[in-house]
């Protein structure tokens, strides 16, 4: 009988990175732009994915980027869900396309960008 060896859990070590909390159908243009500018990114759209990234993969992002522009159907309900995910991450948050009343639902908002913001401006805000 052959002994099996288990691989050690791969720990991701970084001082800076972005956790993108997003709707599953959201386009990933700003994710690609962040990665092209050498910013480690992780994406989660459910509580399970968030837990897996933070606890099992050992991802250590320094902030949350949450783009609300694509959220149209059942917006109030979906914004509440995304606010819960952002709160669970316990990190400073950058919001994109949030209405003034929605911004109050998110903890520790460090920047709120308008809906017409460019991907370059999002990347600049992350680097600031």
Image: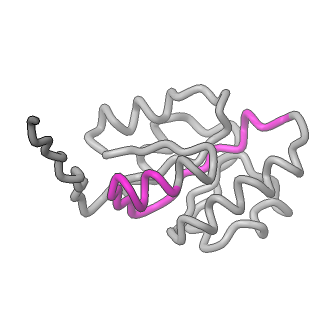
Q: Give, as a single range, the part of the protein colored magenta.
A: 51-72
Q: Nearer the viewer, residue 32 or 44?
A: 44
Question: Residue 12: where, in percent of width, then height?
Answer: 25, 53
Q: Height in image: 13 above or below 92?
A: above
Horizontally, is 52 left or right of 81 in the view? left
Q: Height in image: 102 above or below 31?
A: below
Name the residue located 51 percent from the left edge and 57 percent from the top edge: 51
Question: Residue 99: where, in percent of width, then height?
Answer: 81, 54
Q: Is residue 27 on the magenta stretch?
A: no
Residue at the front extreme of this rendering: 1
Horizontally, is 114 left or right of 111 in the view? right
Q: Height in image: 24 above or below 50?
A: above
Q: Image quadrant for the N terminus?
A: top left
Tell me the quarter of the picture where residue 4 sits: top left
Which color mode does the image show?
one colour
Horizontally, is 86 left or right of 105 in the view? left
Name the residue located 75 percent from the left edge and 52 percent from the top edge: 98
Name the residue located 13 percent from the left edge and 45 percent from the top edge: 5
Q: Nearer the viewer, residue 55 or 128?
A: 55
Tell me the quarter of the picture where residue 128 sits: bottom left
């Amino acid at each position: 009988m052959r002994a099996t060896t288990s691989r050690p859990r791969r720990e991701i070590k970084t001082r800076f990175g972005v956790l993108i909390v997003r709707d599953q159908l959201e386009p990933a243009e700003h994710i690609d732009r962040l990665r092209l500018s050498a910013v480690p990114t992780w994406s989660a759209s459910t509580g399970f994915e968030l837990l897996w990234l933070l606890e099992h993969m050992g991802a250590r992002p320094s902030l949350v980027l949450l783009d609300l522009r694509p959220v149209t159907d059942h917006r109030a309900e979906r914004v509440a869900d995304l606010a819960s995910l952002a709160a669970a991450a316990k990190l400073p948050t950058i919001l994109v396309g949030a209405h003034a009343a929605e911004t109050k639902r998110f903890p520790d908002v460090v920047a709120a960008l308008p809906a017409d913001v460019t991907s370059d401006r999002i990347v600049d805000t992350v680097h600031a």
